[in-house]
Image (cartoon, grey):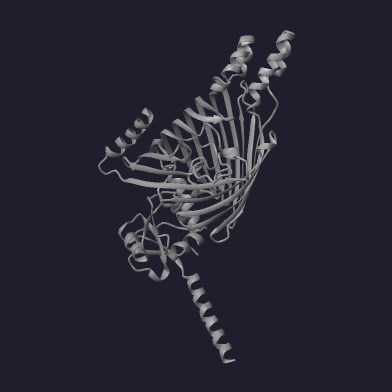
Amino acid sequence: MLKMHFKKGCLAALLALTTHIASADVVMVVHPSNADAIDDKVVKRIFLGKEKKFPGGASATPVNQSADSSVRSQFDESILERSSAQVSAYWSKLVFTGKGVPPTEVANDAAVIAAVAADPTAIGYVDSASVTGDVKAISLN
Amino acid sequence: MMKRILALSLVAAAVSSSVHADVRINGFANLIGGITSSDDTLYGYDDNIGFGEESLFAIQVSGDINDRMTATGQLVARGSDDYEVDFEWAYLTFEATDNTNISAGRFRLPLFRYSASLDVGYSYHWVNAPRSVYSVPFNNLDGLRVDYSNYAGDWEYNLQLSAGTIDNDFTTAGQDANFKGDNVIVLSAEAQYEALKLRGVIGRAKSTVDVPALAPAIGQLRSISPELADLVEFEDDTGEFLGFGVEYDAFDWFVSAEVTSIEATDSYNPDTIAYYATAGIRYGKWTPSLTYEATDADDGPKLLDRVAGFPAPFQGPLTQLLVGIQQSFVEKNDTITAGVRYDYDTNVAFKADVSKYTDDIDESSDATLVRFAVNYVF
């Protein structure tokens, strides 16, 4: 009986852990001077190379995260609505027809924040827990 | 060869003329192996395992000449050409506005949904795009292309106007041939609304198809009737291309189809309708799919109604010649393919498929083909 309880406890802990991972919030980050109204459609267009400007008309530079990061796969699946492999297939179509260059990739949340803080045109995404005062965070949900 | 050197120097000059040129090097590779059922052949494969028919390696170099101009060159080594390296594309792109690009040089004609990335196996779920539709001898164009893309509400759309010339060696009905297209003009339009994508294309060209193996028969025909020879010959005749495509991609599953029509009325070339429909599901890293494709170029020989106007002794030989010339191009077949793609990584995919080819003209050509592939992009 004790064993049983122990197992249940383990399971609950595991469940809590996985839900925690799955619900880690991805937020968009832009330069503090950026006052544009940014929604998921704008983000999708900018990160898929369909739009080169923010709604206000200023040019936009998307900053991506490396393909093996969990925040990247979460961003790809929830915002771009494709798996990372599909996003990569999408870009290979554009790259090899000279129609586009995929966004620059950086290593982690800290690198995204550094890039965005230094560039008024930049837009990136990070785990909400990583946001600092150097950037402006925009939640898409 | 001269063309290749020209293309190479064009890109090299364009890239090196600017000290600040940002040069990007990308590449892709498809390693494809296949084997048919015993004593059969399909797409160049036979019942001994072969890797050369569809495998290819490619490198693309592109450089920004300035803020608005980019030079792109693509070097491709195809197994079917003994991996001889060829400069297949070389063009300059000028970004006229945020929505309009103008390209000049040699590039892929935007005839089909996957025209542009036809060689990039990683970009689609098949081992190779359906041959019935995609295997045409006029894929690359020397000329100009204007691309316009924009969106209206939730509709995204893209218009492409291409104009130029085509000159391409190919094989038809087992014979060496050359396709020449002058005054080629192609207009294509694509619109996307969320998961739905529609595509239409219309094109025409003054076309000449030279098949040296046909020359004796056309010569004989000419000795009886120069007029009939001119009509059956495929020389400076108007060729028309029509295409329509639809796709619904709901992420977890997708369906798509394309249908094309090729006509060159005053020639031996039969009017050709080709189409495919494909459906698949995405289950994690796995994408199983089914594809049905068919070609119908079997309208019966043209020009036979003209034979009656000739004196009786000529009617037999004329009919024989007209039928003989056209017969080898008659085609009616379909293929069903079951395949699976596995996304090993964001730049590597593994694939395998089985195709069953049914030939309605010649039953002995029926074949079953098994293929497997590795696609890589960098």
In this picture, is B216 found above or below B350? Answer: above
Q: How many labels does the image show?
A: 0
In this view of the protein, which residue sits in the foreground, B219 or B45? B45
Quarter of the figure with residue B319: top right
Percent across and percent down for residue A16 are 51, 78
User: Which residue sits at x=49%, y=41%?
Assistant: B116
Q: Is residue B11 visible?
A: yes
User: Which residue sits at x=51%, y=26%?
Assistant: B178
User: Which residue sits at x=58%, y=28%?
Assistant: B240
| Residue reaching furthest to the bottom | A2
In this picture, is A124 found above or below B51? Answer: below
| Residue reaching furthest to the top | B311
Q: Can residue A138 be seen in this view?
A: no
In this picture, is A12 found above or below B101? Answer: below
In this view of the protein, which residue sits in the foreground, B222 or B98? B222
In this view of the protein, which residue sits in the foreground, B96 or B153? B96
On the rendered image, what quadrant is the N terminus of chain B found in? top left
Percent across and percent down for residue B55 are 48, 44
Percent across and percent down for residue B129 are 56, 43
User: Which residue sits at x=64%, y=24%?
Assistant: B326
